[in-house]
Amino acid sequence: TVPTTKRPATGRSDQRPSSDDAYLQALSTAQPPPPTELTVPDDPRARPRIVIADDDTVVVHALQNSAQAYASALDIRFWQAGEGDKDDTLIVYLQRQIGDGWQPDVLVLDINLAHGGRSSIDYLGALRQTPGLAALAVVLATAQSRADLDAGRLSDGKENVTQVNPRDWLERVKPYEPEAILYGKDGSIVFLVRVGESASTWRQMARRRAWQGLLDQIAEQLDGQPELKSVGQTIVDYACQELAIDYAFVRWRTGNEYFEPIACAPSGEILPDDKVRVAEVPLLAKLLDRQPVVLPAEKVDKQLLGRYAARAGHHCLGVGAKLEERMVGFITFFRRAERPVFDQEVDGKPLAILARLLAAAL
C-alpha cells in the first residue's frame, strides 16, 4: 500500500468565520504528524488529479521524486515557471491539459511565484475568471510559517518575487477564496501526503463554489426576463465547463405527456424536435419525486434510460422542475464513470434549487 495519513482532511470550513483573522486562521493548516496510508482507487483514472505549480527547480525535482512513491494513489503533474515554452503560462498549461482530456481537480500554487509579468496572486485572480478554470480547487502553498508572513519576513536567502509584502499576501488572496493555505511546504513525501489526503475535500469545496456561481448566474438572468432557451443554454454550458459534466439536458413540458428540449450540451446530442414521454424512459418516473436523483454509473443501465441508452454506464444526476405539484420540466446531467460520482449533499441540494429557478422561468 502507498503510505499516507488517516487523519481528517484539512482546509477551511465551508462557513467563513466572522472576523478576518479567524477567516485567515481557518484557511491555514497545521504541520501534520508522520503519514501512514493513502487510498489507492481500483480504477487508476479515479485518482485525484493534481497540478503543482512552482518556480523553484530544487523543490520541483524533489516533489517529482517523492511523487513516484504515490503514482498509484495520486495523478500529479508539474508546471514550473520559466520552463518550456516562454509563452506557456500557467493558464495556457492548464487549458492544454483540459484540451487533452486531463481535467485537474486541485492546483497547488506556490504563493511566492512570478512569471510572465504575473504573480501567484494575479494568477489566482485570473483562474477565478477563466471559463473552464473558475471552479478549480486552488491551494496556496508557502515554505514559510504563518508567523513569518505576519512579520513580513521570508527565510534567509529567499527572494520575494511578488512585489507584495508577505504580511499582505493573505489579505490580497482572500477575495479569491483559495480552498486552503499550506505552510511549511517542501519537497518531501510528507508534504505530498498533506495534499493527497485533502484533495477530495478541496474538490468538494470547489464544487460547492461552482454550483453557487451557476445559481447566481441564473438568478441574475431571470431578473432580466430572458428567453427560456437562453436560461437552459446557460445551465448546460456552465455544467459542462465548470462542473465536470459530460452531457447535460434541460427539457420542458409542452403538452399533457411530452417533454421537449430547451437546451443540451454538447450541442447535437438530441434533435431540437425530440419529444419524450415519461412512460418511455423509466428514469423520468424517478424525477417525478421532489428529491434529486443521484445514481452511480453501475446503476445507470439501458433499461433505466430507454431510448437514450447511449448514456448507460455514466453517473447520473437529475431532478424534476415542479410548479404547483406538476412537473413542468427536468434537468439531467451525466458524467463518465471514471469521473467522481455525484453527491447528494454537494450536487443534489444546489440542483434542487436550480430546478425551482427553472420552474419559475417556465
Image (cartoon, rainbow, N blue to C red):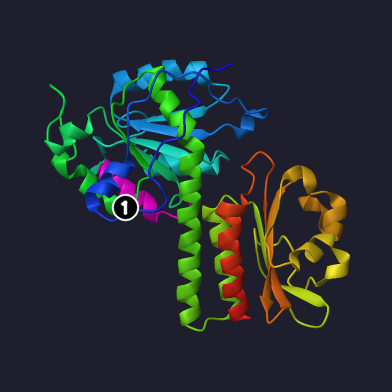
Secondary structure, mark 1, is loop
Q: Can residue 265 be seen in this view?
A: yes
- The residue that appears at 35% across and 53% down in the rendered structure is 16
- The residue that appears at 49% across and 18% down in the rendered structure is 36
Foreground pick, 328 / 89: 328
Q: In which quadrant of the rendered view does residue 34 lie?
A: top left
Question: What secondary structure characterizes most of the magenta part?
Answer: helix
Q: Can residue 251 be seen in this view?
A: no
Q: Mark 1 points at which residue?
A: 17
Foreground pick, 104 / 46: 46
Q: Which segment did they paint magenta? A: 119-132
Callout count: 1
Q: In which quadrant of the rendered view does residue 2 lie?
A: top right
Q: How far from the left and from the top, in percent, is residue 234?
A: 55, 67
Q: How far from the left and from the top, in percent, is residue 63?
A: 39, 20
**Horizontal arrangement in the rendering, residue 152 relative to residue 180 (left or right):** left
* Up/down of 163 relative to 237, above or below: above
Find out whether residue 339 is within the magenta segment: no
**Horizontal arrangement in the rendering, residue 91 relative to residue 315 (left or right):** left
Going by the numbered disc 1, the residue's amino acid type is Pro
